Amino acid sequence: MANLDVLLPHGRGPKRVDGVDFVLALASGPNAWTTPDSASTPMVRAGLVSGLASGVATASVLTALILVRHEGQAILPQVGLVSVAIAAVFTMSSSSLAAMRRQQNRGGRRSVLALRVLALVVFSTIWIGTVPPLLSPLIWLFGVLGGVEAALTASLIGHDPRFGQLFGHFLLSPVHLGVVCGGLAMSLLGGDWAVDRMVITAIGSLEVAAVSSIVTFEMFRRLLSREGEDRTAIQRIVRAAESQRRAHWIHDDVCADIRELRVKMAAMHLDHEQVSQELDQLDDRLRERQLDEMVDGGAIAAAEILQSSVRRAQSAGVVISRVPRFEEASILLEAEAARLLRRCTSGFVANALNAGATVLGFELAHTETEVVVTVSDNAGGFDLRSAPAGRGLASLVGELGPGRLISERVDGGTAMTAHIRLGGSS
């Protein structure tokens, strides 16, 4: 959208625009409103697919009519005319393809505008010279393409005309009045049936295409508006539920823990060291709850999860022999992978502490498909095959998958390694 400076100045959001700006944006195609981060809602995707399908259908219809009309003539002119017609339709419908890929067409706004206008003129010329008057309503398919693009453009640049306004503007537009008056003049002055046929085809096709575009525009505009209202309502409900949940958490957990600490201080006369220990425990509980929120939200750095287990081991007096480097632990994990990494590290640390470990080491590596975490200890050997069925490690094997949880004997202890699949990998 930033490419269309007259509509969306740099650094500012969408604003209301007039009809001239809307026509310029529509003629400019995807360079006016498609960006890598533009919205891709189900309704937008459905509209883009519909527009692309309409363009393909229009090219198919025009190709069939050209072949029928020029049947028996030299093949080379037919192929050339079909190629030009398909190229013109593709140029105009390429907006849908570019927008589906969230890419802009090559070239600046002016070059794309000129190319699309030229393609429209070429398409109109071939259509009028090929299609008989009785088949001119087939242009309805092309009107659907224009209506979809118009609705998307209007929605994204802040233009909101209504059905009556669009129809009135079309009737009084220079293009419509020029085609009708020019066609009537040619028909009256020419007196030739071939000229009359093209005039009827031109006027009929223009009227049908305009009605098709306006009807499609209004229908799709309403669908987009309804989708936006539903999305806003859902977001409002989610925000309200999230605010209420956080309020309950602050009241039930944070405030309750603080009140409990105050009661202990009043009843037991805790000294400074005991108060410090209680505050450390409260800090740990709050950090664990914060980590729960981050894991549920997804896109959490592996370092955040490892830090919790490292802090827990240090609080128990364990020496940390090694931790991953920043570049190794900075990978962002989605919710499922983050949950598994947290379960693995916390489970490995808990088992090591219960076995009497005094030294722990943490290692982390990742590829495009998986994260590999290793926790090693000095608490003696451990055989994963001896883990009782139904216990934590046994169920973890089921979640990770066969062969993805490995225990190895190391000097004076065990190294537990988990291979965690990243989202989309199998």
Image (cartoon, grey):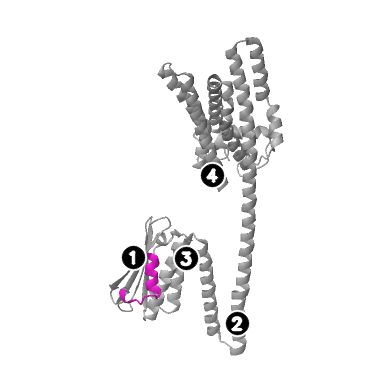
Asked if marks 3 and 2 touch (Cβ < 8 Å), the reply is: no
Q: Secondary structure at mark 2?
A: helix
Dot label at residue 260:
2
Specify the amino acid type for callout 2.
Glu
The residue identified by callout 3 is 304
Q: SS for tag 4? A: helix
Judging from the image, what secondary structure is the residue with disc 1 in? Answer: loop
Q: Residue at x 53, y 84 (%)?
A: 273
Residue 421 percent across, percent down from the top left: 39, 60
| Camera-side mark, 2 or 4 | 4
Q: Is residue 402 magenta?
A: yes
Query: Which of disc 2 and disc 1 is earlier in sequence?
Result: 2
Dot 1, crowdedness within 10 Å: few (<14), some or many (≥20)? few
In the rendered structure, the answer to whether residue 144 lies left or right of residue 401 reads right
- The residue under label 4 is 45
- Residue at image location 65% in from the left, 39% down from the top: 218
> Which disc number belongs to residue 402?
1
**In this picture, is 156 found above or below 132?**
below
User: Based on the displayed image, in which of its 4 quarters is residue 374 positioned?
Assistant: bottom left
Q: Which range of residues does the magenta coloring cover?
A: 385-403
| Residue type, label 1 | Pro
